Image (cartoon, rainbow, N blue to C red):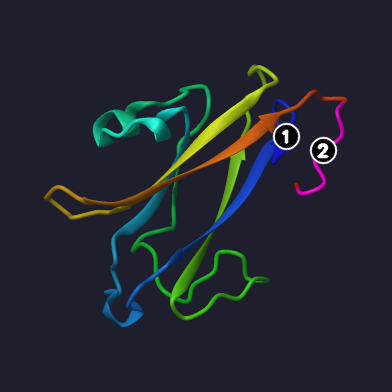
Amino acid sequence: MSAPPGGIIHGRMYVDFADPATVPSESGIYVHVWIGSGNIDPDLGTFLMNVDSRFPRLTQPKVPGLQPGVSQAPEIPVRPDSSLLDFKLQVPSHVEQTNYLGNICLMQRAGFDVGTYLGRASFEFRVRGIDEPPDLAT
């Protein structure tokens, strides 16, 4: 994936449910995405705080949270035991042309209690020059 400064990084991710029949209608399960090098940090607290503040933080989906069989990209159907999320990350116009690391945290909100950390992943993308051609896969 790549984009020039001021462009958009478009990403999609699937979340699979081990037992979709047990997911409540208000799951409270969300995916949080941000840019930074936190994925190598084994400590959950500092992993979540390792943020490149020049980039936005994104959380999907809308309330009430992830639901099995739901796709945010209507042209892409999903299995009954998965969900597809669609992210559009705005690249700030003043960042360096280099590679960046993105972080993904799967979590479940718990109302007035501490939520549950469910997992993490990472991705990479490149901020390219304005005159540089886009990657074939973007």
Residue 48 in which image quadrant: top left
What residue is at 59 percent from the left and 40 percent from the top? Answer: 89
What residue is at 29 percent from the left and 66 percent from the top? Answer: 27
**Disc nearer the start of the sequence (2/1):** 1
The residue nearer to you, when weighing 67 against 64, is 67
Compared with 10, 95 (above or below) is: above
In terms of secondary structure, what is the magenta stretch mainly?
loop
Q: Secondary structure at mark 1?
A: strand
Residue range highlighted in magenta: 132-137
Q: Point out the residue furthest to the left here.
A: 113
Residue flagged by tag 1: what amino acid is it? Ala
Compared with 40, 21 (above or below) is: below
Q: Secondary structure at mark 2?
A: loop
Which residue lies under the disc numbered 1? 3
CA gap, disc 2 and disc 1 = 7 Å
Residue 84 x, y percent position in the rendering: 53, 64
Position of 104 compared to 13: left or right? Answer: left
Position of 116 compared to 9: left or right? Answer: left
Position of 55 compared to 51: left or right? Answer: right
Residue flagged by tag 2: what amino acid is it? Pro
Residue 125 x, y percent position in the rendering: 64, 36
Disc 2 to disc 1: CB gap under 8 Å: yes
Whether residue 64 is in magenta: the answer is no
What residue is at 40 percent from the left and 71 percent from the top? Answer: 67
Which residue lies under the disc numbered 2? 134
The residue nearer to you, when weighing 11 against 43, is 43
The residue nearer to you, when weighing 134 against 89, is 134
